[in-house]
């Protein structure tokens, strides 16, 4: 397996758990490659940590390309020597698809979990997928027809987050675990899990906290950090003098789901976290910033008017989005206040997100594991 960044680690860990359950004996599973702490808890042997792949944007990838190319070459050589029964690339298509093509050409069966967003941008990737992947494991139901039409074997397995996140969040319990009071409004702020996101997005999010605090001094802000390194960077930003005296802003290590469950509204960077917020049925404001050169390239490749998964899946402007120069403290802060002050809007969002949750809740771990084990059996029978 190869999983990039925190969200890929969590998704892959769910599949590893499903494989162990389907096999019946955990010792029958040997899983190696690139992963993170959640995968390691499932017995995964991480040759590299998934943070090594946490790069987003063209300019950023160009800078890191020599390192990433060297790592991919080393990984390919180790996998060709080991020759696993099935290789699973988890998201990270820019890294995984080239690797998958090499492995498949050498006779190793290849699955890819979390299909690239070809329905949103870079639809030409379908040809690279056809050459690189034996079987796609899809997390959104509308994707199945795309791969069927392209002649690529695919199984809709649902989204593991929809299984992991409860249908009814324990708000009071989450606040208690985080030491938060029950009678105050709470805004959770999630600037992302990649270093580049902290560079480009986090400063604007911190200024938004300051903007909101000046207008609502009684608000409490919670900022969860995915890793110790990100915790240190965020602590430096929050302590850098951008926040007014007396503001109640709490940086926490991990506990992102508790931070979302405890919130009245969430300011979140575009990515998997937006789906998590939707599954917790919380109002949110989505924003994204990246290097100017990367944005100029990416904005010309997009097919959809939305960047956030909740809006894409609902095919509507369900929650506000602010991108690049539009992601100002005034715009994001005002949108959050509008959500905090409108109970009817919150109720409407909760109903919409409940429907979304139902459509994605499919026991993903079991479905994905069964598909992977079927690939192994087909490989064995073809020998």
Image (cartoon, rainbow, N blue to C red):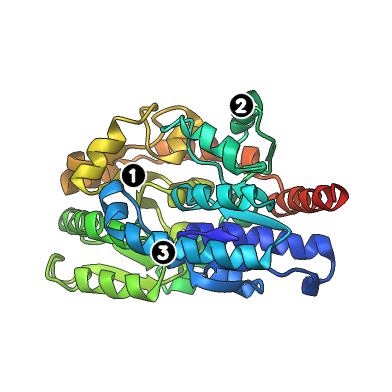
Badge 1 local density, few (<14 within 10 Å), some, or many (20+)?
Answer: many
Q: Which sits in the foreground, 18 or 89?
A: 89
Of circles 1 and 3, the one toward us is 3
User: Which mark is on residue 285?
Assistant: 1
Q: Is residue 280 visible?
A: no
Q: In which quarter of the image is residue 16?
A: bottom right
Q: Is residue 157 above or below residue 250?
A: above
* Sequence order check, earlier mark of 3 and 2: 3
Q: Would you name the residue on which mark 2 appears?
A: 150
In the image, which is nearer the foreground, mark 2 or mark 1? 2
SS assignment at label 3:
helix
Is residue 76 visible to the viewer in this orientation of the structure? yes
In this view of the protein, which residue sits in the foreground, 259 or 287? 287
In the depicted structure, whether residue 66 falls above or below residue 117:
below
> Gap in Å between the C-alphas at discs 3 and 2?
32 Å
Secondary element at tag 1: strand
Rendered image: mark on residue 70: 3
Q: Distance between the residues labelled 2 and 1?
A: 35 Å
């Amino acid at each position: 397996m190869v999983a990039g960044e925190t969200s890929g680690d969590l998704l892959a860990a769910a599949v590893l758990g499903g494989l162990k359950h389907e096999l019946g004996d955990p010792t029958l599973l040997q899983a190696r490659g690139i992963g993170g702490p959640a995968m390691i808890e499932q017995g995964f042997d991480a040759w590299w940590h998934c943070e090594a792949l946490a790069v987003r944007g063209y300019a950023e990838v160009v800078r890191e390309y020599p390192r990433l190319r060297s790592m991919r070459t080393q990984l390919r050589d180790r996998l060709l020597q080991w020759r696993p029964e099935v290789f699973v690339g988890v998201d990270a298509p820019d890294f995984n698809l080239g690797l998958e093509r090499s492995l498949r050409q050498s006779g190793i069966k290849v699955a890819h979990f979390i299909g690239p967003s070809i329905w949103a941008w870079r639809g030409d990737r379908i040809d690279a997928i056809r050459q690189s992947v034996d079987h796609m494991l899809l997390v959104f139901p509308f994707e199945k027809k795309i791969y069927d039409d392209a002649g690529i074997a695919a199984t809709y397995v649902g989204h593991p987050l929809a299984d992991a996140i409860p249908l009814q969040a324990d708000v009071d319990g989450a606040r208690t675990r985080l030491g938060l009071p029950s009678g105050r409004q709470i805004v959770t702020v999630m600037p992302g899990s990649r270093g580049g996101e902290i560079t480009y997005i986090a400063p604007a999010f911190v200024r938004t906290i300051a903007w909101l605090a000046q207008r609502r001094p009684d608000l409490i802000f919670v900022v969860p950090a995915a890793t110790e390194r990100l915790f240190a960077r965020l602590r430096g930003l929050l302590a850098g003098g951008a926040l007014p005296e007396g503001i109640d802003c709490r940086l926490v290590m991990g506990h992102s789901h508790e931070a979302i469950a405890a919130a009245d509204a969430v300011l979140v960077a575009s990515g998997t976290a937006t789906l998590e917020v939707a599954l917790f049925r919380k109002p949110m404001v989505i924003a994204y910033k990246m290097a100017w050169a990367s944005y100029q390239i990416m904005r010309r490749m997009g097919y959809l008017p939305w960047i956030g998964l909740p809006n894409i899946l609902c095919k509507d402007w369900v929650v506000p989005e602010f991108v690049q120069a539009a992601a100002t403290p005034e715009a994001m802060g005002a949108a959050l206040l509008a959500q905090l002050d409108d109970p009817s809007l919150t109720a409407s969002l909760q109903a919409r997100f409940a429907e979304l949750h139902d459509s994605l809740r499919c026991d993903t771990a079991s479905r994905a594991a069964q598909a992977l084990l079927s690939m192994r059996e087909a490989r064995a029978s073809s020998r």
